[in-house]
Amino acid sequence: NIYSDIAAKHLLYSRLVDTVYFGDSYASDDELGTVGNINKDVIELGIVLFNNITQKEMDIILSTEHTNRPDASGYIFRSLESRKYANIGSPIEPNNCISRNAYCLTVDNKKFMRYSGELQICLNELPQDNRVNVVGYIEENSRILTDYIKPGCRVRFKLIKTI
């Protein structure tokens, strides 16, 4: 059940508890396994990606854990690792440069020059920028977990679906 997963993550990421117990005697093996495998030191967020993104953008998002930069603002999560990873291979072309809603995922394109390839999560609404590709968004059930993202925090993305 997705709700037991999100509820357990919410409790563990809050650091208010060390352990989660099930009061449901009918919890499935999948539920128990999913909750038992939560890493309280890495926030896992379910995401939906647009099907028109490049393989390189997909690799930037899914190939590694991302650390929120120490100098990140309250408006965006900025991945420390993504820009280094993006410098390998071809440049990221502008695509889907639309208004950035809260909880959308973005990757800076080649027009942002040295920031090209930087992955961000918009935590607030931001205007359209032709240097920024909107590649997907945090799925609705995971959005509550973004409250726990602080500077220096590690995040991992779990692909829920593409649209």
Image (cartoon, grey):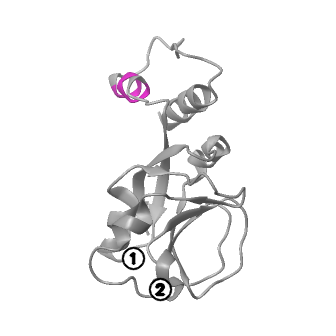
Residue 19 image position (x, y, % from top left): 52, 15
Q: Which residues are magenta?
A: 30-35
| Residue shown at the point (64%, 40%) measured from the top left | 148
Residue 97, percent across and down? 56, 84
Reading the chain from its start, which is encountered first: label 1 or label 2? 1
The residue singled out by tag 1 in the image is 53
Query: What residue is shown with label 2?
Result: 95
In the image, residue 162 sits, relative to residue 112, either above or below, namely above
Q: Is residue 162 visible?
A: no
In magenta stretch: residue 1:
no
Work out whether residue 120 or residue 67 is closer to the camera in this orientation and state it.
67
Q: Secondary structure at mark 2?
A: loop
Corner quadrant of residue 58: bottom left
Q: Is residue 81 left or right of residue 73?
A: left
Residue 71, percent from left and from top: 64, 56
Image vertical order of residue 133 relative to residue 148, above or below:
below
Q: Residues within 10 Å of mark 2 (few under 14, many from 20)?
A: some
